[in-house]
């Protein structure tokens, strides 16, 4: 698998873990070697890995909407870092997200996730596939 495909795959694994409410899978997505940051919509930044995982545990236990799909993923790759900007499509709304990954020996691991409201026109569902920059 080409490196850009590996990064986009890591991004999709994040959303699969989210939809499945699978804390072990979400834990495997996030980096263990360096600092991480997660900003859920409307929340303050969470800067400690243990606190990030606790936030996901709480989200997965809630009755909130979890059918989040990534759409129109756009990759910007650096040597050891990669940014994926995408829309997060929910049943009744959508957001825009930035996900950052770092290359590790065992693959690409998430170090940053930030999702928030987007008030531009809703992205089309038929354009849900990834695009590479």
Image: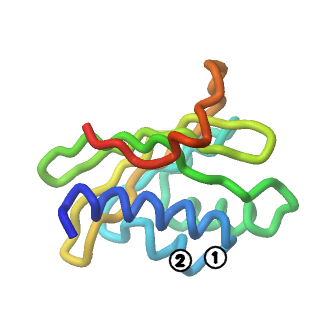
Q: What residue does disc 2 label? A: 25
Q: Where is residue 104, by image quadrant?
A: bottom left
Task: List x then y, in percent, for residue 102.
Answer: 27, 57
Report whether 84 appears left or right of 66.
left
For the N terminus, which image quadrant?
bottom left
Viewer-closest of 92 and 114: 92
**Judging from the image, what secondary structure is the residue with disc 2 in?**
helix
**Judging from the image, what secondary structure is the residue with disc 1 in?**
loop
Residue shown at the point (23%, 55%) measured from the top left? 4
Give the colour scheme of this rendering: rainbow
Task: List x then y, in percent, for residue 107.
Answer: 26, 71
Q: Where is residue 56, by image quadrant?
A: bottom right
Q: What residue does disc 1 label? A: 22
Report whether 114 appears left or right of 23.
left
Residue shown at the point (63%, 26%) measured from the top left? 118
Q: Which mark is residue 31?
A: none
Task: List x then y, in percent, for residue 119.
Answer: 66, 20
Q: Sort mark 1 into few (<14), some (14-19) or many (20+) by Cα contacts within 10 Å.
A: some
Residue shown at the point (47%, 61%) measured from the top left? 12
Please identify the residue farthest to the left as the structure is shown. 79
Task: List x then y, in percent, for residue 125.
Answer: 61, 41
Q: Sort mark 2 into few (<14), some (14-19) or many (20+) by Cα contacts within 10 Å.
A: some
* Marks 2 and 1 in Cβ contact (< 8 Å): yes
Viewer-closest of 109 and 77: 77
Please identify the residue farthest to the top as the structure is shown. 120
For the C terminus, which image quadrant?
top left
**Is 44 above or below relative to 64?**
above
Tell me how far mark 2 sits from mark 1, CA to CA: 5 Å
């Amino acid at each position: 698998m080409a490196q850009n495909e590996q990064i986009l795959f890591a991004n999709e694994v994040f959303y699969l873990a989210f939809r499945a409410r699978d804390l072990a899978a979400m834990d495997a997505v996030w980096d263990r070697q360096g600092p991480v940051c997660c900003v859920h919509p409307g929340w303050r930044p969470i800067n400690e890995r243990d606190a990030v995982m606790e936030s996901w545990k709480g989200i997965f236990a809630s009755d909130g909407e979890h059918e989040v799909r990534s759409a129109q993923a756009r990759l910007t790759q650096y040597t050891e870092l990669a940014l994926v900007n995408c829309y997060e499509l929910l049943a009744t709304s959508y957001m825009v997200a930035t996900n950052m990954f770092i290359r590790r020996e065992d693959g690409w691991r998430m170090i940053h996730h930030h999702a928030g409201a987007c008030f531009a026109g809703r992205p089309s569902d038929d354009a849900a596939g990834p695009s590479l920059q």
